Image (cartoon, grey):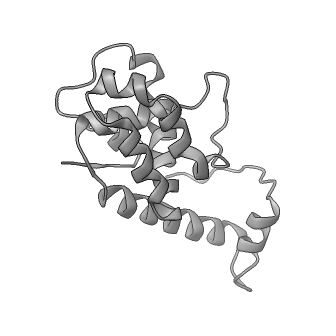
Amino acid sequence: MPARRMSVYPSAATDRLLNAVPGCTLSGRISQAADAYMEIMQAEIAAISWTHSQWGAVLEGTKPPEDEHSASVTGWGMAWASILNSADRLSVKWNVDAEALAQEVRRMSVARKLAVVEASQRFWAHSRDLWDKELEPRGVSDRRLSSSGITPRMA
């Protein structure tokens, strides 16, 4: 992939991460951290064994607001609450126990919760215009999530 110049305005946590390895170039450290992050996200998503309907309910329940233009992970800790708030509707629409799904997400490790939110953000970034149509018969993630770099395993 061709190199691309960009400005980075790091948060305090990002600044600590970028400066944690003395002697490493800024672009090298960013690439190293991003590669590690994506490996963790992929491994965590692959470990979740939800059905098509369960993924549909979770993705719909964690859909970012329409006016959100940038991906933010500040809400990852409360992803379960978003699902729980819509549990009645999601349960009927997807024929799942959305309340149990919300509690499952609540009990997940920090890394797995973050991976679910990452998968949701990537899914919606790639499919906002497609959501009104029926989901693909093989699964909610087959084309859309895999094209975004996150590939869940369907139960």
> Is 123 left or right of 5, judged from the image as shown?
left
Residue lying farthest to the bottom in this orientation: 22
Q: Quadrant of residue 3?
A: bottom right
Residue 62 visible in the displayed image: no
Residue 50 visible in the displayed image: yes
- Residue at (30, 38) in percent of width and height: 54
Foreground: 85 or 39? 85
- Residue at (69, 83) in percent of width and height: 21
> Is 134 left or right of 100, judged from the image as shown?
left
Q: Quadrant of residue 88?
A: top left
Task: Give the image location of residue 20, x and y in percent.
Answer: 72, 81
- Residue at (45, 60) in percent of width and height: 108
Foreground: 13 or 97? 97
In the rendered image, the vertical position of residue 75 relative to residue 70, given as above or below = below
Task: Give the image location of residue 93, x and y in percent.
Answer: 32, 21
In the rendered image, the vertical position of residue 144 relative to residue 152, given as above or below = above
- Residue at (39, 61) in percent of width and height: 44
Picture mark count: 0
Foreground: 90 or 50? 90
In the rendered image, the vertical position of residue 66 relative to residue 11, given as above or below = above
In the rendered image, the vertical position of residue 51 relative to residue 61, given as above or below = below
Foreground: 128 or 95? 95
Task: Give the image location of residue 104, x and y in percent.
Answer: 39, 52
> Is 64 left or right of 151, judged from the image as shown?
right
Q: Quadrant of residue 41?
A: bottom left
Task: Give the image location of residue 72, x and y in percent.
Answer: 65, 44
